[in-house]
Amino acid sequence: MSNFEIGLGFRENEVAFVDRLQVGSEEAFETLMDLYKASVYNIAYRVLGDSSEAADAVQETFLKIYRGIKSFRGDCGLKTWIYKIAISETLNRQRWWNRWRRRVSVSLDEPLVPGEGSPVRFEPRDSGANPEACFAAKETERAVQTALRHLSLEFRLVVVLRDIEGLSYEEISDTLGISLGTVKSRLWRGRLELKRELREFVNGRLA
Amino acid sequence: MECKQTLKLLNSYVDDMLSWEEVVSVDEHLHICSQCSYELHQLKTLRQLMRSMRRQQPPTDLALRTQIRASKQDIRLVLERAFAKVEDFLRPIAIPAFSGVALTVVFFIILLSTLFTGANLSASDRDIPLGLITEPRARSLYMSQFVQLGNLVSLREPITVETYVGTDGRIIDYKILSGPRDRATVRSLDEFFFFEVSFDPATSFGRPTHGKIVLSLLFFPTSNNEIDVMG
């Protein structure tokens, strides 16, 4: 079964697919990875802001899935279940990462490479010198990543899941185990913060 | 609808999460309120900005690395499961098994001690202990008319004799260690030992063997003319 076929009729085939995963089919696990590794990686990357940390988080997530797929009872959708694991793994990393970064904060800031979202790299005076360059994909990327990092974790998660991963409110509510109302309010607060952080871009586009 | 309400609903409006009625009223307000329109525009721009983010590609070898780690984990998982199964099997029988073993130990201790002490209590003096070397033992010592009393009268002082006992329990030879050594005494002793006395032979690991025994003889001139023998 190709990824395309699974993607097309995934809802219908989910039970059969989970069955195959549960009996330990390597092929099914491979397919699962192909389907979700990019999403899991992106969530982890956007939340953690570090590619190698994100890669580790993806690996741990899929190992947990591999270990735990037998206990998956289908109470929630497979996608929600995977996202739940991914987020808990990412948050574990985040806690660890924060502790570690605090300890070596000085030495770590300097070797930050462009594209990693270093606040040092994003300077408004660049945009003053060459406004068009600000909207170059890389600059945008960097600015958004920085803004995300300045958001508190609970807002960041909701914004990443909604605006980058495109999950519905219900899916976010299931994944994070919070009410729909909380999803809405966190999204509202998160976007407000982001708007403030990214005012250069948001206002600039109006012009 | 006022700005305050509209601003609250704008997020859901952008995400198409409003009911039809709500959408209509927000639209109406947006037509007349440039501030809220600007807010909406900003929100839409922000969303567009977020969506335009380049999708990060995970490292190409990530899947392979994960699968390798997963297969390694398989082995650990199998071992863990095996241990868990053994544990599950043992746990319910742990207490009965332990008490069984403990009871058996106690039972055997009691049984063995009974066996040994029982053997000691019930065995007669004649039993030959196996695995040991025993001394010869006087079986009967009595005076008969063959022994000439007259001679033994001279045994007023104690006489110590070392006797050599053969495998059949008979005396082969004897030697006076202390006491009178006159002829009459020797003859009386000869008669006494060779006709009146019999021994259980010495044993070595249960088999009769030669042995020697030291006897102290003392004649008491009582009415019964007893000879007291002290071995």
Image: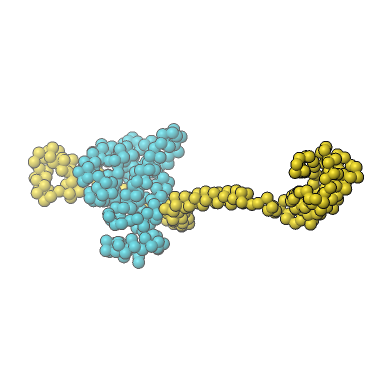
Chain colours: A cyan, B yellow
Residue B119 left/right relative to A143: right
* Residue A25 in view in this figure: yes
Residue A9 percent location from the top left of the image: 27, 64
| Point 29% across, 40% down: residue | A154
Image check: B163 left or right of B127?
Answer: right
Point out residue B62 in the picture as x, y percentages from the top left corner: 43, 53
Please tell me in which quadrant of the rendered image residue A148 appears.
Answer: top left
Q: Report the quarter where the N terminus of chain B lies.
A: top left
Residue ranking furthest to the bottom:
A1
In the depicted view, which residue is nearer to us: B113 or B203? B203
Q: Nearer the viewer, residue B91 or B172?
A: B172
Residue B170 image position (x, y, % from top left): 80, 54
Which quarter of the picture shows residue A194? top left
Residue positioned most to the right: B183
Horizontal side, residue B231 vs residue A128: left or right: right
Q: Position of residue A192 (x, y in %)?
A: 23, 38
